[in-house]
Amino acid sequence: MRVANLNSHNNTTVKKIVNNGGKNMEHIVKILPNQVKDMSLAPLGRHKIDIAEKEMPGLMSLRKQHTGTKPLKGFRLTGSLHMTKETAILIETLKDLGADVRWASCNIFSTQDEAAAAIAETGTPVYAWKGETLEEYWDCTLQALTFDGNLGPNLLVDDGGDATLLIHKGYELENHFNEHGDYPEITTTNPEELVIEKLIRKVHKLNGNHWHNIVPDIIGVSEETTTGVARLVQMEQDNELLFAAFNVNDSATKSKFDNLYGCRESLVDGIKRATEVMMAGKTVVVCGYGDVGKGCAQSMKSYGCKVIVTEIDPICALQAAMEGYEVRTLESVLGKGHLFVTTTGNKDIITLEDIRKMRDQAIVCNIGHFDNEIQVDALNDSDAKREQIKPQYDRYTFPDGKQIFLLAEGRLVNLGCATGHASFVMSTSFANQVLAQLFLAKEKPEVKLYNLPKELDEEVARLHLEHLDADLTILTKDQADYIGVDPKGPFKKDEYRY
Ligand code: NAD
Ligand code: ADE
C-alpha cells in the first residue's frame, strides 16, 4: 500500500463548521496528519538528511544565525516544492526559525519517499509520495494549504507556482459565482486543468467563501523557479496578484548556480539511472540555451557527446555558437539526434510529428518545469504502443516498428528519474528562499513582485566559499574608490548579468 500510516489517500472533503474570528468557516478538507508512502523509510531518510546537512552550509548557517530569535514564530507556512532530502533541510530550517510548516511536493514524480517519511516522523504535516496521480497531487496541495481551523497560510514557498495558482483560481471562481450565481463553463480539455477546475468547484460547494477568507492572511510567496516567476510576472502585469511575491529564481546565487551547475550534473544522473545508456559519441539535441540549457549542453559535451542547440533568442543562439555548439532548427536535426532534451520553459517544443521523424531508439526527455514541452498526451493518444520498462521509463513502438524512449513521462527528468540537484547547490537556492521568507515576514510588503537585494545575494555566495576552500580577495579602500564600490559590497550594479 502506498500510504503506510494512513487509512487511505482519500482526503475527501468534509463539512464541519468552525467559528473563526466571527467568520463562518466550513472545513474544506479532512485534515490528515500526513500522507507519505512508507513510514518505515524514515531512518534512511534521516541518515540522508544528516549527511546532506554537511553539504548545505548556507542553509545551516542561516539556521544557526536566526534560531535564537525565531523570526518566523507565529507564521503559518505552506510549501509546494519537490519533497527531497534537501527540501527536508529547508523545512527543518523554517521550523527552527519558528514557522508552523505544512508541505506538498510540486511534482508527481519528484518526492524522495525516505525524506518525506523522515519529515512526517517529526510531526510536520507532509503530503507527498513518488508517483502521485494528478488528483492526488492537487489534493496534497490543498492539504498543505489547509491549517487547523480551516485557516490558510501566511507565507508560501512555491516552485512553479501551483500553490499560488490554486489560491488564485479558487478566488477567481468565488468572484465569478458571486457575480453570476453559477460556475463558468469548463472549456479546457487539458487533464490537469480539469482536475483543478473540479477541485475548486468541490471546495466552493463546501464553503463559498473559503479563498476570500484565507487570502487576507497571506503575506506573500517566494517563488523558486523560472517558470513560476514567469507566471508571477504575468499576474502582476494583469493586476491579478493577490499577495506579495518574491522572485528567488533571479538571485544570481540561484539561477546562475542551481539552473546551470545543478542541471549540469543532475540531467545525466536522470538519463543514466533510467536508461543506462553510453553517452560518449552520441548526438544530443538541447532545446533552449538559457541557464538550464547551458548546464545541460556543457554536461553532454563533457561526456563526449556531439551537442546541437536549438534557440529562438539570437543572443543565446550566438552564445551557443561561440561555445562551439552547432545551432540548428529542431526540424533539421530530428533524424540526427540520439537524445533530445527540452530546457525551454515553453510548450510544444517536441511535437508528436517531431517524434515520428526521430531515429529508432531515440531518447526524449525534458528538464524544464512542466511536462508540456513534449507533446506527451498526443503521443499517448497516437498509434504508438506504450510499454513501461520501469516507472518513469517508457518505450513507444510505432506501427512501422520504430521505437522511442520517453523519460519521466515528459516531466523533469532529473527529479523524476534521479534525485534532482546535489545538496550543495540546493543550499544556495534555499538560502535565498529563507532570506525571502524572513523579508516577507518582517516587512509584510505591499502586493508587488520583489527581488533579493544584491547585498544578500553576495552574502549567500559568501556563505558557501569556505566549504569549497575558496579564498576571497579583499578590496583595498583605494581600489574600491577607484572602481566606485563600497569595500564591503555590493560589487556589481543591479544590471550585471554574471
Ligand atoms: P531561461 O529563460 O534562462 O532559458 C530558456 C531558454 O529557452 C531561453 O533562452 C529561450 O530563448 C529558449 N526558448 C524558448 N522557447 C524556445 C523554443 N521554442 N525553441 C528553442 N528555445 C526556446 O530559463 P531557465 O532558467 O533555463 O529554465 C528553463 C526551464 O527549466 C524552466 O521551466 C525552469 O523553471 C526549469 N528549471 C528546471 C530545473 C530542474 O531542476 N529541472 C532547475 C531550474 C529551472
Ligand atoms: N530542484 C532541483 N533539484 C532539487 C532538489 N534536490 N531538491 C529540491 N528541489 C530541486
Image (cartoon, rainbow, N blue to C red):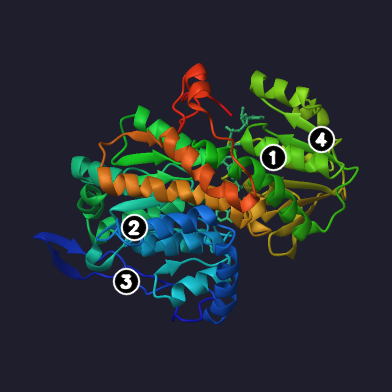
Q: CA distance from mark 4 to mark 1?
A: 12 Å
Query: For this rendering, which residue is in front, 321 or 430?
Result: 430
Q: Is residue 14 above or below residue 251?
A: below
- In the rendered structure, are the residues bearing label 3 and label 4 in contact, judged by CB atoms less than 8 Å apart? no
The relative height of residue 26 versus residue 239 in the rendered view (above or below) is below
Q: Amino acid at mark 3?
A: Lys
- State the residue position of label 3: 30
Mark pair 3, 1: CA separation = 43 Å
Label pair 4/1, CB-CB below 8 angstroms: no
Helix or strand or loop: what does disc 4 sit on? strand
- Amino acid type of the residue that numbered disc 1 sits on in the rendered structure: Gly
Q: Which residue is mark 2?
A: 77
Residue beneath label 1, please?
Answer: 295
Residue 266: tell me if it is visible.
Answer: yes
Q: Which residue is at a point 46% across and 23% down the rendered structure image?
A: 485
Task: Of the two numbered discs 2 and 4 on the same chain, state the one appearing first in sequence.
Answer: 2
Residue at left offset 71%, top offset 41%: 296
Q: Residue under label 4, please give it.
A: 307
Across and down, in percent, residue 302 comes to 82, 42
Q: Nearer the viewer, mark 3 or mark 1?
A: 1
Q: How packed is label 2: few (under 14 Cα within 10 Å), some, or many (20 or more)?
A: many
229 on left or right of 13: right
| Neighbour tally class for label 3: few under 14, some 14-19, many 20 plus, Cα within 10 Å | some
Q: Write down the quadrant of residue 243 in the picture.
A: top left
| 3 or 2: tag closer to the N-terminus | 3
Report the amino acid beneath label 2: Leu
